[in-house]
Amino acid sequence: MPRFEFFPNLFMTLINVRFLGHKTRPVQAVFRIAPRMNKLEVKEYLQTIYGLPVKKVMTDNFYGGYRRIQGKRAMFHVSRPNYKRAVVTFERGAVVYKPSD
């Protein structure tokens, strides 16, 4: 029986790679993901599409907050978007490339 994966409108942006050349610590990658994605979806996404050996996924939710802008006649409130961050730990020997700065 075939296995189907469906990832509608989910984005993952690689922000940073930690411990890339370290001898004892495993490689970690930091992603900015959609707020509705969970840990299992992140793990399945990386394993099925990119073939990366994922060991552990940790997520953090960030509140975008508000910003006050003074206009000529009134004060405006602008909201920033909420976002979620995922820190993914890979198995030893995983090949992960650092994003160019």
Image (cartoon, grey):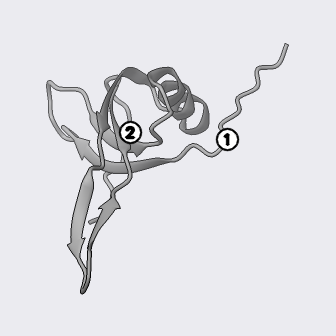
Classify mark 2: residues with Cα within 10 Å, few (<14), some (14-19) or many (20+). Answer: few
Q: Give me the C-alpha separation between circle 1 and circle 2.
A: 26 Å
- Element under disc 2: loop
Classify mark 1: residues with Cα within 10 Å, few (<14), some (14-19) or many (20+). Answer: few
**Mark sitting on residue 82:** none
Residue under label 2? 95
Q: Quadrant of residue 71?
A: bottom left
Residue under label 1? 8
Q: Is residue 37 left or right of residue 97?
A: right
- Residue 45 at x, y = what percent? 55, 33
Q: Tell me the mark number nearer the camera, choosing from 1 and 2.
A: 1
- Residue 80 at x, y = what percent? 33, 56
Q: For the N terminus, which image quadrant?
A: top right
Q: Name which residue type carries label 2.
A: Val
Q: Earlier in the sequence, mark 1 or mark 2?
A: 1
Say above or below: 64 vs 48.
Answer: below
Check the image and name the residue furthest to the front.
Answer: 73
Q: Name which residue type carries label 1.
A: Pro
Foreground residue, 80 or 59? Answer: 80
Check the image and name the residue furthest to the top.
Answer: 1
Q: Residue at x 31, y 39 (%)?
A: 29
Q: Residue at x 37, y 32 (%)?
A: 94
Q: Residue at x 31, y 51 (%)?
A: 15
Q: For the C terminus, which image quadrant?
A: bottom left
- Residue 48 at x, y = what percent? 60, 30
Foreground residue, 41 or 27? Answer: 41
Foreground residue, 100 or 9? Answer: 9
- Residue 89 at x, y = what percent? 31, 27
Q: Quadrant of residue 2?
A: top right
